[in-house]
Image: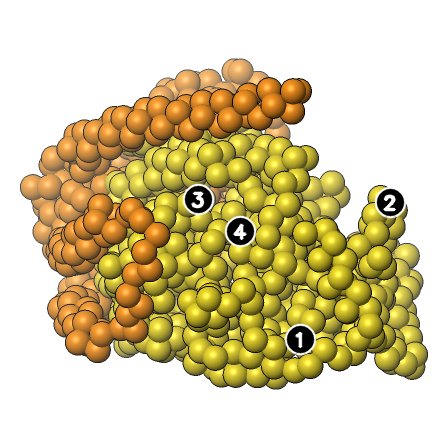
Chain colours: A orange, B yellow
Amino acid sequence: MKLHTFLITDNLRNHLAKEGYDLAMKRLAKWRLISIFAILSLILSGCGEPFLSTLRPAGEVADIQYDLMKLSTLIMVGVIVVVMVIFFIVLVKFRRKDEKIPKQVEGSHKLEIIWTVIPILLLLLLAVPTVSATFKLADVSPMEKKDSDALVINVRSNLYWWEFEYPGQGIVTGQDLVVPTDEKVYFNLISSDVKHSFWVPAVGGKLDTNTENVNKFWLEFDSAKAEEAGDLFYGKCAELCGPSHALMDFKVKTLNRDDFDSWVADMKEVKEPAKADTALAQQGQEIFNKSCVSCHAVTPGNTTPPEARLAPNLTNFGDRSRIAGVLEHSEEDLKNWLRTPEKYKPGNLMTGKYPELSEEQLDALTAYLMGLKVQE
Amino acid sequence: MSTYAQKKGFGATLWDYLTTVDHKKIAILYLIAGGFFFVIGGLEAVFIRIQLAVPNNDFVSAGLFNEIITMHGTTMIFLAAMPLVFAFMNAIMPLQIGARDVAFPFVNALGFWLFFFGGVFLNLSWFFDGAPDAGWTSYASLAMASKGHGVDFYVLGLQISGLGTLIGGINFLVTIINMRAPGMTYMRMPLFTWSTFVTSALILFAFPPLTVGLVLMMFDRMFGSNFFETSMGGNTVIWEHLFWIFGHPEVYILILPAFGIFSEIFAMFSRKRLFGYSSMVFATVLIGFLGFMVWAHHMFTTGLGPVANAIFAVATMAIGVPTGIKIFNWLLTMWGGSVKFTTPMHYAVAFIPSFVAGGVTGVMLASAAADYQYHDTYFVVAHFHYVIVGGVVFALLAGTHLYWPKMFGTMLNETLGKITFWLFFIGFHMTFFIQHFLGLWGMPRRVFTYLPGQGFETSNLISSLGAVFMSLAVIVLLYNIIATSVKNVRVGNDPWGDGRTLEWALPSPPPFYNFKQLPLVRGLDAYWLEKMEGKKGMTPAEPVGDIHMPNASFLPFVIAFGLFVAAFGALYHMDDKAWSVPVIIIGLLITFGAMFLRSVKDDHGFHIHKEELMEDDKDKGVKA
């Protein structure tokens, strides 16, 4: 008797479980639909930010890459459609309905040839433009020529900041890369500590900054697209380099050629450290000269060897868009940064290199640093 | 009364497993250890997703985050996916070829214990001075700059566990070449056995480069050499090459057995032989071969130049062809079949769109010039989780349900299994699909946080929510395992009713000698052929006779343990600790002492006599 009831409850439980499962299935299917819609609306909501997204290409390199993305996506969506059509036919048509044993088919040479040859053709369709683009993007011959008037920029990556040296112009800056629009800009990339990777997503793909060799490539910044992006592109470090890898951002300021030339001229004019103009800033300059100047230069000349440039050049600090690459460019954030750099960029090399600063000293130093401008 | 089926106490069972050389028990050890590390790696993944759920989050610090991502990757690849794959290879492959064990049962146990102690050593880093934090790829410049002992744990732990994997692979190769039952020709081997074979060959060629890299790094960090010290003329790009010459075949080492498991499932639950068997075998071998020709596609942005990049781009695309052949063969296996949607079949069916999605992004990544944009972004994260989770993890979960009765003699609950599946499937796509777009929108990978205002917020939150579903799935699976083990309803030889290959001709679990008489294999899907002719089991290929079996041994455990001890000495050697050298010596003495003992003490194994085998039969007759 007892066994009997057990059996019944067991059956019942199984039955209920099955029903519960079916119900859950339906609910899950509904949820899946909702999540698909959510994803779709996200996709439709845009292709990312104009200053950051690879899907909003703002230059020749990014354009070439975007075209390749579109071509490969198109081919691949074609493949997916074919697979999914067969897939759903199979799922609907060949469910087990009875216990009959289906015919045991060995295979089909004809089909196998079809699904070997067609993918090869599709891949060729992608391979040819890939190879041609790969060579095109690696073509840096104009920068190697003697007396070339191409703009060359040496990028040196450091834990966790970027240095940009313009060898032809004889100036050095950091964190904010300034470039002219609508012309090819050539880059020499190297790292001074661990491997990083130089990436301005909206303008073109990345290239690593190795520790042992100089990597070269070029980018072009489109003026119309740059305007859409507010003439300020986001740059990223794309290779894990330590705790603050995520915070190793830089910015790219785009100027037209004339403005760029005048920026270069303004920079070059700074031969001596600029004299602070207010009393407070002068006080700040004294502190700076005591505690900071051994690492941070305030003249743009590239007269010292790279190994001696231990920290970002601050000649035009007041013109920059961010503090330490990630904080708002405000006096408050500058003071925060100077108080506890470790809090804002863990593992940075500035922490502990200077004595603790009192609030008065911070005020003075901030006034001095914010006054370091080359442009009005 | 059989002497082998007595109930044992906990201590005796534990000792049995510590000393076992039986491939089926070693499989269970791999399953438990791999499952344990899978849960740890999963927890690490959950921490990653919590940290990234909102911008500027401070759930974990920047340094800790790097430790978590490094350990998540390393644990999942080396300590979860690999051993779980090994679990099924050990459990099933010898049965599929009609063998009584692997070729070297002692070495098989040694392989497990080396993996186990290597994995434990690596994870102990959490309790000493920090886990490795240079990423699972441990690129040399960052790894050399990493403070503390994290990277040393990585270097030593992976050497020990890698040794285990290597000898495991050699063992499988020898087994498949030498121990196939009469009639089991190469072209009659089940696809899972074929993929085990090719995978083992890949292990044989892929692990030595990793070991070389690890040894160089060990010397650099612990003994003052300068292989990767640029200022002393070293070169860090060499590490990238060594790592990826291993690393790329490694992903095929994981995915090929997954293909094998799915091939079995498609054929079984469609009640049809695998469509295009010989082209499937050919595609498997070809993928294995091409797997060694494409490593530099992980280094497109390293600056190898357009010639190298173009060659490796085209070679990488070529892999799409044999993989496509496989996908279509699986679809055509189901075509015209009688498809039953069991839990393993749910995974197999879901695998097709998931893996195709991962495969096509793979081809997109192969396009070198475009890869400059994808490389090291969340697009890559999405891609490799689509192939590794949508391929390997789906296969491991499918294999767990499929082979559970064969390994433990009881079925997992199907309803719970399907709930696990749906939770995991939805969670997986929710977590990773959106990450393609995050990458394209400019989010680099391995970032511990992101600033607001870059358009990453919503998508990251969705991705993190998906992780909740996957976690729930794993919890349901664990509950399923416990609940069904407690109930312990015993099942017969072919619990799914659709078994095709030799393992389903044996009791669940099989006796420790597997086959009383080696079976005669008369074609592909040997057991299915017999079933179709109305026979209950296999036709024996030999009369009942004495069976020679290996003795259990504690030595594999001891050999591996010695290296574990020595590794601690080596690790602290760079701190100039006085005890470091003696500890190295003691550890090596334990290892080599145990090996010496093994060499001088003859171990001839034992025989199960014919009469006992007959008695076993009678026993069963009574029970039935």
Pick the front one: A128 or A292: A128
| Residue receiving disc 3 | B343
Give the mark nearest the N terminus, 3 or 1.
Answer: 3
Q: CA distance from mark 3 to mark 1?
A: 33 Å
Query: Is residue B36 shown left or right of residue A134?
Result: right
| Residue receiving disc 4 | B495
Q: CA distance from mark 4 to mark 1?
A: 22 Å
Q: Residue at x 28, y 65 (%)?
A: A103
Question: Where, by quadrant of the figure, is residue A23 drawn?
Answer: top left
Image quadrant containing the N terminus of chain B: bottom right
Rendered view: B525 above or below B381: below
Pick the front one: A72 or B217: A72
Instruction: Report the disc number at residue B517.
Output: 1
| Residue B508 picture location, percent across and down | 63, 55
Give the mark nearest the N terminus, 2 or 3.
Answer: 2
Note whether residue B350 is visible.
yes
